[in-house]
Image (spheres, rainbow, N blue to C red):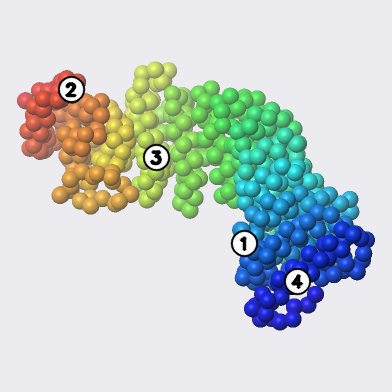
Amino acid sequence: MILTSGNPSAIDSQIPQQIQKLEAAKVSLEQDENSQRVWDEVANLFQFFADAAREEENRKKILQENALDTVVEILRHTTQAEATKTASGALLNITMAYEPAQLKAIELGAIEHLLNILKADSIDENEINMTISTRVIANLSELDSGAQSLVKFDGIKTVVQLLQKTAQDVEAYMDLMDATADILRAVASKESAQVMIQTQGLLPLLLDVVENAGTSDEGKTEEEKKEDDKKIGEIKAALVEVVVSSTLADANMVPIFNDKEVMSRFLSWLDLADREDLQTCAALCLGNVARSDQHCVQLVHGYNAVEPLIHVVRKATDLKASHAATGVLRNLALPDTNRDIMGDAGVIQACFPLLKKDNALPLQANIVGILKRLCTNNGHNTIRVISGREPFETLSSTSDTEGELETPLSTLVDLIGRTDDFALKSEGTRTLCNLVKIVWGNEITKEFDTASVTALQQTLNKPEVVQLIAAMTRNPKYVVLQNEGVIALTILVTSPAQANKNAVLEALISIEVDAQPDAETISEEPLDQTKSLTLLESLLSLIKNQDGKCPDEVRTNVCVFLRNAVASATRESEDPAYLTFIKSSGIKDTLAKVQGQSELRPLVRTAIQEVLTRLE
C-alpha cells in the first residue's frame, strides 16, 4: 500500500477507508486463513497504517477509528512473517510517544502476542520481526500497566533468554540486543520485575552478558570500532542499571545475599581494575544488599569485602566506581563490630584523600560519613582521623611538624571551609563535634597515655576547628545542629590549648552572622537580625526562645556553655577583654528578663541562675 499523498489531511481522509478494508480482510481470513492474496493485502494495509502513524494527528485518528483492535486481533492469530512484521511496525508507529494508543494496545493484550514472536527458535529467520517487536514492547513497558503486563505473561524471562542468545554474536544481533536491553531498562525500576529477575534465576544470566559480551575489532576501520564500542557500551550500561535495580527490591535482599555464587562474582569483579564498569556495578549491588546490620557484619567478617573495596577506592580512575565503593564502605561502617577491622585494613587512609575532589559532592559525602561512623565509640579510628597515625604511636613527639602533615582531620577541615553545600558542611562539622566528644570521653581514651590524649585534644582545640563548630552553632536553621555545636564548644572552652588565646572565647566575641543570611541556611522564621550577631548573641537568642521552637534541654545546654565560658574568661591567664566583652554585652539583663518569665521551667531557671552567679 503506497500513500497517495504527502498531505496529512489527504492521508487522514484515507484512514477510514483503509480500516474498512482491514476489517474486510479479517473476515476473509476467518473464512480462509491460508489465502496468500488476503495476507498480502493485510501486510500492505499494515504498512499504510505504519506510514500514516508517523504524524501525530493520524495516530489519533487511527485510535479513534478502533483500528488498533483489528491490528492486535490479526496479530494474535497470524504466523505469516510479512504480516507479523508490518503489524509490529504499525503498532510501533501508532504507539510511539502517544500514551492513549499505548494504553489501548496494552489493554488489548498486544504485549502477550509480541512476546510470542520473541520465542521463535531461530533469530536469523525472525530478526527483523523480533527487533520491531522488542521496540514496541519497550515503549509499552515504560507505563506501569505495560510493565505489569510484561510480568504477567512471563516476559522478563523471555526477554532475558533472547538477550542471552544475542550476546553469543553481538555483531550480528547488535540492534536486537539493544532493543532487548531497552525493555529491561524500561521495567528495571518496577519491583515486580526486580523480584521476577531474582525468583526466576535470571540474575546470573544478566551477569554473564554484562561481563562477557563484546565485539571483535578484526577487519574494522577505526570509525567502525569506535561506533561499535560506543553502542555495546550503552547496552552494557543499560544492563548494569537493570542488575543494580534488581538488588534494590526488599524481597530480593536476603536471597541475593545468600546466593554465594552471585556474591562471589560481585566480589571478584571488585578486583578487575581494567573493568571499572564491573567494579561500579558490583559495588552498587553490594551496597544495596548491605542494608541491614547483619548483612554488613557478614560482608566484613564472612565475605571479607573490605580489602577489595579499598582496592577500588585506591585504584579507580572513574569517579562512579569510587563513589560506589565508598557507598558500600559507608554502610559497612555502621555496625560497631566492623569498625576495628575496617580501621586496621586502612579504610581511613584510602578514603580521606578523595575529600579533595570538589567535582564529586556525593563522593565527598560518602567519605565524611565513613569517617564519622568509623570514629563513633572507637578510639583507634579517632586517632587515625585526627593524627593520621596508627594507634599507640607517640603522638606528642612531633607537635612542631604536625601542621605540615596532611591528615584526615586537616583535609576534612579544609573541605568544610571551602564547600558551599549546606548538607556536606553540616555533616562535616558534626563529625568534628563527635571527635571532640570522643577524645574527651574517658571510656574511649583511657587505654592511651596522657600525653597522646593531650596531643589529640590540642589538635582539636585550634581556631580552624573551633571556628567551623561555632559557625554551625550560630546558624539558626536547625536547632539540633546548634545543640551539637554547643555541647562541643562547652567541652573545648574549658580545655587547655596550645595557642595563647582561647579559641572558643575568641569565637564567642568575634564570629558574626551575616545580616541577611542565605535563604538555604535560615529557618522558615529566622531570628530578627537587624545587625550582625556574634556567637554570644546567637546563643542568647536560643535562651530567649522567642519563636518557641527551642527545647528546654537545648536552652539548658546553652546556659552550661555560658557558665563554663564565663569561668574560663575569669582565669588569670586569660585576656581580660573576654570577660569585659561578655559582661558588657547585656547578657545579665537578657538572662534576668528570661528568668522572670512565669512559665519558665525550673530546669532552665536554675541553669540561668548559675550563669548569673558566675557573672557576679
The front one of 205 and 346 is: 205
Frontmost of labels 2 and 4 is 4
| Of the two numbered discs 2 and 3 in the rendering, the one whose residue sits closer to the viewer | 2
Q: Which residue is mark 4?
A: 18
For label 1, the SS is loop
Kindly identify which numbered label has been placed on residue 601: 2
Q: Disc 3 versus disc 4: distance between alpha carbons?
A: 68 Å
Lower sequence index among marks 2 and 4: 4
C-alpha span from label 2 to label 1? 64 Å
Mark 3 lies on a secondary structure that is helix
Q: Name the spot of residue 260 as percent of width and height, x first.
A: 72, 30
Q: Position of residue 381 (x, y in %)?
A: 47, 29
Q: CA distance from mark 1 to mark 3?
A: 48 Å
Disc 4, SS: helix
Residue under label 1: 98
* Label 2 neighbour load within 10 Å: few <14, some 14-19, many 20+: few
The residue depicted at 71 percent of the width and 82 percent of the height is 5
Looking at the image, residue 491 lies above or below residue 321: above
